[in-house]
Image (cartoon, rainbow, N blue to C red):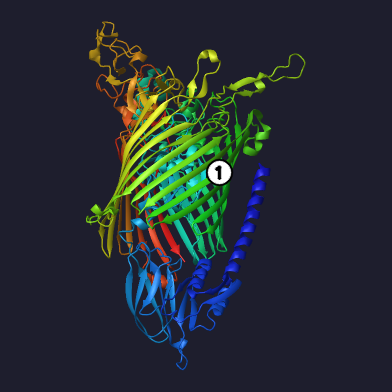
Amino acid sequence: MPGPCSQMLRVMRYTAYLMLLFFLHVSGKNMAQAVTISGNNMPLTKVFHLIEKQTGYVIFSNKKVLENSRPVSLNAVNMPLPQLLDLALTGQPLGYEINNKTILIYRKKEDGIPAQNPAAAGNVTGIVLDSANAPVERATVRLMPGNKGTSTNQRGAFLISGVAPGSYVLEISCLGYQSVRHPLTVTGSQELNLGNIRLRQSSNTLGQVEVVVAYGTVKKTDLTGSVGQVNMADLSKAPVASFTEALAGRIAGVQVSSQDGQPGKGMGIVIRGANSLTQSNSPLYVIDGFPIEDPEDGMLNPDDIESISILKDASATAIYGSRAANGVILVETKKGKIGKPVVTLNLSHGIQQAQKQMEVMGAYDFVKYQNELNKTSAAATYFQNGRTLESYKDVQGIDWQDQVFRQSPISIGNIAVRGGSGQTRYSISGSVYDQEGIVINSGYSRYQGRVSIDQSIGRQFKAGLTANYSRLTTFGQPLAEGNGPSFTTYLLSRAWGYRPVAGDPNTDLQDDDGDMAFLNQYDIRLNPITTNNNEYNKSRTSDFLANAYVTYSPLSNLVFRFAGSMSNRQRRGDVFYNSKTVQGSPLNPRNVRGVNGSVIFTETNIWSNDNTVTYTTNFSKDHKITALGGVSFQEYKAETYGYAAQNLPNEQLEMPGLDEGIPYSSFASGGENFMASYFGRLTYNYQSKYLLEFTFRGDGSSKFAKGHKWGYFPSGSFAWNMQEENFMRGLKVVSNSKLRFSYGSTGNNRVGNYDAFAGLSFPVANSYSFNNGVPGKGAIIGGLGNENLRWETTRQLNIGYDLGLFNNRIEVTADWYRKITSDLLLNADLPATMGMLNAQQNIGKIRNQGIELSLKTVNVKTKAFEWSSSFNIAFNQNKILELVRGQDALYSTVNFETQYNNNPPYISQVGQPAGMFYGYIFDGVYQLSDFDKSPAGKYTLKAGVHNNGAAAQPGHIKYRDVNGDGDITTADLVVIGRGQPIHTGGFSNNFSYKGFDLGIFLQWSYGNDILNANRYMFEGNGNIRLSLNQFASYLDRWSETNPTNRNFKPGGQGTIGSYSSRVLEDGSYLRLKTVSLGYNIPDRLLRTLHLTRLRLTVAAQNLLTLTSYSGMDPEVSVRSSVLTPGFDFSAYPIARTVVFGLNVTF
């Protein structure tokens, strides 16, 4: 795709040049700090205020110093700051001194008294850090007595110059921290370096904490909705590729799960339960104020993220309207800050490995099993030349997992430069993430860069530009995706199933590409190591996201904001199968394409524009009203095209040789949609005691037909800060007590672009020449339209309570919610007379309700030691209230093996949660006592003993006869388990002692089941394949000498393709998710190294899992959807990771 790629590179190159020129221009401009002030008879206090507003400098003075000063008249346009100060102070008994970003105004010595000799004055310097050794910016530093002072820069550094000899007390204060005082003595002209000074966070800062919400921020005490805040310090400790992966278990009501552990695989996030049955339940992401649906997981570097807020209830999400029914994740990235450039460098390197391997049969047990399965075949294969079963007792079989899994390296590098002046702030960062998979020939890499510039233009305008580019590459065949109808097209199936020993001593299974002894076993004959190493499966994704804004403030309480963004995603997927792969080998009878390959391209472009106006007013000192209104527009376009070729004559050329093959597929498609919206929000605050908020949004979408294009989503909320009431003021133990109520509606329009409209297709296969030599294409209906299709709507009620005790050393948040989603967008079944099987319709209703509880505590807090904890737990109950008219259940199938693919293991029915497991109840194994034995040795079931739907014999599987009719039929199929957990949660503990800190985070899921489909094939050989190895658990199988009820005997699986509770397992788990240990190098060494911060870390991810699940990992759902949760077959295991890190700040 050279055209679009080259064009994008040119755009990026020109953008980089323009941004560089812009940056150099504004940087040069601000070195001079030009100021514009015009006015007559202005007091100096007003002049100083205007200087501070335009430059960002802090001016220190007081009434005594300004005593007897005279008003001034100025007409300065873009005048350099020192020149303006000289002009303003001409004829005044005042002088000034500029240090860093501060200006000190002082009284001049009276005539006749010599001024202080500057050479005799000293300087006081230092660095202010927080308890985590991070710089504290904009802390106020003052010397007492006197009026000398300054503020810290982004690195926490300060300088007070011209300090006369004497004894002083240095006071340092900053919002959110406890003030400190430091006695000192200045002698002569010395420079007194105080080193690092640490501030401790104040325990009662709740009212100062700001929470990012839709289109702005709000003090936490003034929050009326349910918003979860992520602790970024905790999140940054996890060695992961994406922030979504680190969110698991961190916020109550936010369920984060992986389908499996494939490198680069995205995470599934569901907030407060699934609202839709067949459409997306993913939340809306808003990155730096711009909504993005389904962003690439690795698009953002976690190290670039400043804050993450998760909007959960309708009052918080309704302003995003049609796309907010599933919740909203607000991401704010790091921006530049005032001060000299600060360089941060974070480097990590470590190893990954599989948490476990399945135990499979060795050589002796495998041959014994083969003999039981088919004596004739076993005799011909394993017992030739005098060999017996005993001959294999000392044979070392091959466990192919040892060669499929490996210890793999992982490397992470992040670098950033951030700084700024009073008018310009900038941030430039880049990252590299390189991960080899724990399965051979798999991995993931990301190269990413980000630039942001914020510029103040005069007193009323501000502008900013942010651009993010990422290049993601994944390679390796997805383990959970087979390449055909058979289960042995999956790599782990071949690794588990490939026989561990050959009967022929001349057959070397390690070196041979294929096992020629079993011509009827299809792809299981192919060496899993050779085939996997020869597969070429690579996906490359380029993501470019840019946004810009301009704000205009004609009044201090009125702000206009105009913003626009564009997103471009290009993806190319290459697949090539040579003659040594399952899909390209001539040894595989199912391969009809020979050596083959394919390529697919997709490109997605999204343009959006948001325009808002915000007005804030206060009256009578007790009342505050804020009004916001806005309009937004979005356009979405996507294109997909590709081709495939087979029977390539020259496989050495690989992908470039596709043009030599025979084309067997070519395709192209495209789509677009448009959205226009208007929205508003009104908030009322009375003494920070009573808080009201109302929001409204209207969305119009091109996805719906005329008359149904618009959806309207209002909400309202109320909060009562009870601690502000007189009756609470005497309760000193209570520092916060707030009751919250909210109700509102949100929508979902995540259907196809043209589902509301009928479509036609003109396939080549429908062409006919009509004897004239010119084929004429026939048209067929591609899908039935539905002009009555409309918005899916979710209405939510939320009641919450926030409690803070002992100056908020204990914080409790509790929420109860109920969500009802109506007009479900379903791909509903149609009568056969319609000529089409399905069509999108608004039919159905679903309810989610639950309780969320969060607890944060500061357990111990001394000068040297601190211990804090955080706990959250969430319960959600999902219930289907209505379905398609005349239908009370939906049955869902999954694909993994031909005989099972048409039988549904899931049911979603009215009155029950969605995605319940469905099948027969496993009732053990038929025993000899269940049968009568004839003199001829034939077994027949005794009277009153039901069959299993097949010719039952001793040792065969047994199902429960639920309806008691004596036969096992589909009437005995029932709900056998639940796919959704009863509750999920997380528990973290953080310890710090002097320079050390330790973080421990536990995550869990409880009450969900997993259908372990691997056991169908490898714990009983469900479709009776010869030479297929089995799990070691199948050693405990039924025989006359071992009448177990756990596993049936070989060939006793009953009707092939039947699902039952035999392979249904408890999927609950408790996982030691993250453990991190850090050490901050002491200050005395930092001064020697000329560094602000140097930190050494070691972190482990997925260190330990407690579970009764017998599979590779309980956090799995390879067919992940609301209707098919908790399905495990050949899932890529989640890796255990240990990394060592170095964090440096210059």
Q: Which amino acid type corresponds to the residue marked 1 in the rendered image?
A: Ser
Q: Give me the residue at 45% from left, 51% from top.
A: 626
The image shows residue 338, relative to residue 268, as above or below, that is below
| Residue 369, horizontal then vertical, whole percent | 35, 24
Answer yes or no: is residue 299 visible: no
Residue 159 against residue 314 in the figure, above or below: below
- Quadrant of residue 80 within the rendered picture: bottom right
Left or right: where does residue 462 sit relative to residue 528?
A: right
**In the shown orientation, is residue 758 left or right of residue 687?**
right
Q: Is 972 in front, or is 192?
A: 192
x, y percent for residue 1110: 33, 34
Residue at 54% x, 40% y: name it: 677
Q: Quadrant of the N terminus?
A: top right
Residue 772 in sight = yes
**Residue most extreme to the bottom:** 112
- Establish if 558 lies above or below 580: below
Looking at the picture, how far across and down is residue 435, in whole percent? 48, 48
Residue pictured at 40% horizontal, 24% vertical = 882
Please give the residue where the numbered disc 1 appears in the rendered image. Answer: 632
Quadrant of res 255: top left
Percent coordinates x, y for residue 589 in the rendering = 54, 23
Q: Residue extending furthest right? A: 772
